């Protein structure tokens, strides 16, 4: 009878000694996985930041360093002449104002139109809403060249060619599908229980939407507005085709004027103007990034 307890004891001891080994292996695997994630994130940040850093370096380099066969990252003799030349050659302030008006109006209108549509599509699911969602996704695959001629003819009949109003209308239509898709996902992520609890307390549909749903949806609305603004600010093709007057052209179109007829770019002023063109998007994101990453359930507290 004695060998059996010894065998059991050996199994128990081996099991006890094996558990710390498995735990250590799991911890090592988690650490390796986390290190791989941080490495991938670092590579992605480098992929995004290096072009911007090179652009900033080029904007402050004098012509002699720009023509060097072995340019460095840090200018040996930094100068502001490229910025002065850029403002002297092209109306950058007026172009920036046109882009700001077009992008700001397009972002605001896209959010105002898409928010109630997204709520209806998310809360009242049906075959029609699913078909509309599918059409929204498919519409993003249409190339710009396919729609530019019909849009041009429509705007020509409406006398909106060479007008910021017509450009804003195009930007709203172009940004609306993706804005609707984004907001629909945000609305579906909101718990229905909060709306039901407010209804039990006697709140009407309008009060629920204003006091409960809207605060919860605020981060999604801000993120969608940011996407629509950046998309409209950087858009080039529609602005090139629809705007002909120099005083109405946007920043991306004006940047092409630094390239000569033979395709030779005035590199210093072009880099300076392009750097200035990226600042509004970066500043806007820096200002509202807390709103985007803020607590989604900030409006769920009953007062």
Image (tube, rainbow, N blue to C red):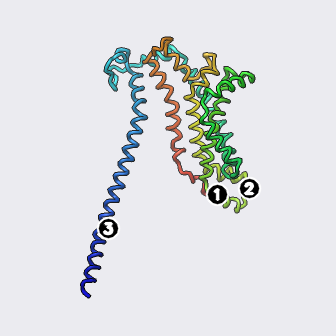
Question: To which residue does mark 3 refer?
Answer: 19
- Which secondary structure, mark 2? loop
Tell me the number on the disc at residue 192: 1
- Contact between labelled residues 3 and 1, with CB atoms less than 8 Å apart: no
The residue positioned 48% from the left and 24% from the top of the image is: 274
Mark nearer the viewer, 2 or 1: 1
Q: Is residue 55 above or below residue 285?
A: above
| Residue 68 percent coordinates (x, y) | 33, 17
Q: Earlier in the sequence, mark 1 or mark 3?
A: 3
| Residue 145 percent coordinates (x, y) | 61, 26
Q: Which quadrant of the figure contains the C terminus?
A: bottom right
The residue positioned 70% from the left and 51% from the top of the image is: 126
Q: Is residue 262 above or below residue 163?
A: above
Question: To which residue does mark 2 refer?
Answer: 204
Q: Earlier in the sequence, mark 2 or mark 3?
A: 3
- Contact between labelled residues 1 and 2, with CB atoms less than 8 Å apart: no
Q: Name the image quarter holding residue 57.
A: top left
Q: Is residue 89 visible?
A: yes
* Towards the viewer: 144 or 248: 144
- Which secondary structure, mark 3? helix
Q: Name the image quarter holding residue 25.
A: bottom left
| Residue 131 percent coordinates (x, y) | 68, 45
Alpha carbons under labels 1 and 3: distance apart: 43 Å
- Which secondary structure, mark 1? helix
Query: Badge 1: how crowded within 10 Å, few (<14), some, or many (20+)?
Result: few
Alpha carbons under labels 2 and 1: distance apart: 15 Å
The residue positioned 60% from the left and 46% from the top of the image is: 218
């Amino acid at each position: 009878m004695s060998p059996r307890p010894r065998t059991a004891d050996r199994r128990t001891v081996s099991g006890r000694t094996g558990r710390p080994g498995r735990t250590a292996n799991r911890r090592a695997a988690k650490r390796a996985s986390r290190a791989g994630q941080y490495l991938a994130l670092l590579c992605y940040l480098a992929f995004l930041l290096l072009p911007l850093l090179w652009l900033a370096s080029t904007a402050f380099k004098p012509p002699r360093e720009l023509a060097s066969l072995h340019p460095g990252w840090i200018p040996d003799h930094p100068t502001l002449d490229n910025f002065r030349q850029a403002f002297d050659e092209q109306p950058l302030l007026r172009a920036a104002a046109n882009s700001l008006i077009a992008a700001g109006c397009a972002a605001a209108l896209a959010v105002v139109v898409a928010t109630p549509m997204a709520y209806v599509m998310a809360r009242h699911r049906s075959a029609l809403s699913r078909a509309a969602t599918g059409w929204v996704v498919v519409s993003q695959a249409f190339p710009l060249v396919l729609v530019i001629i019909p849009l041009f003819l429509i705007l020509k009949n409406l006398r909106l060619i060479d007008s910021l109003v017509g450009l804003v209308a195009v930007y709203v239509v172009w940004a609306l599908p993706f804005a609707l898709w984004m907001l629909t996902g945000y609305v579906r992520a909101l718990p229905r229980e909060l709306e039901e609890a407010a209804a039990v307390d006697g709140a009407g549909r309008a009060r629920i939407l204003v006091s409960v749903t809207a605060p919860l949806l605020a981060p999604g609305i801000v993120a969608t507005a940011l996407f629509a603004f950046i998309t409209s600010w950087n858009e080039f093709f529609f602005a090139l085709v629809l705007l002909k007057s120099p005083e109405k052209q946007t920043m991306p179109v004006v940047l092409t004027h630094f390239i000569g007829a033979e395709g030779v770019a005035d590199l210093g002023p072009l880099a300076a103007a392009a750097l200035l063109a990226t600042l509004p998007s970066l500043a806007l994101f820096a200002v509202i990034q807390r709103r985007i990453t803020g607590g989604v359930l900030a409006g769920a507290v009953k007062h």
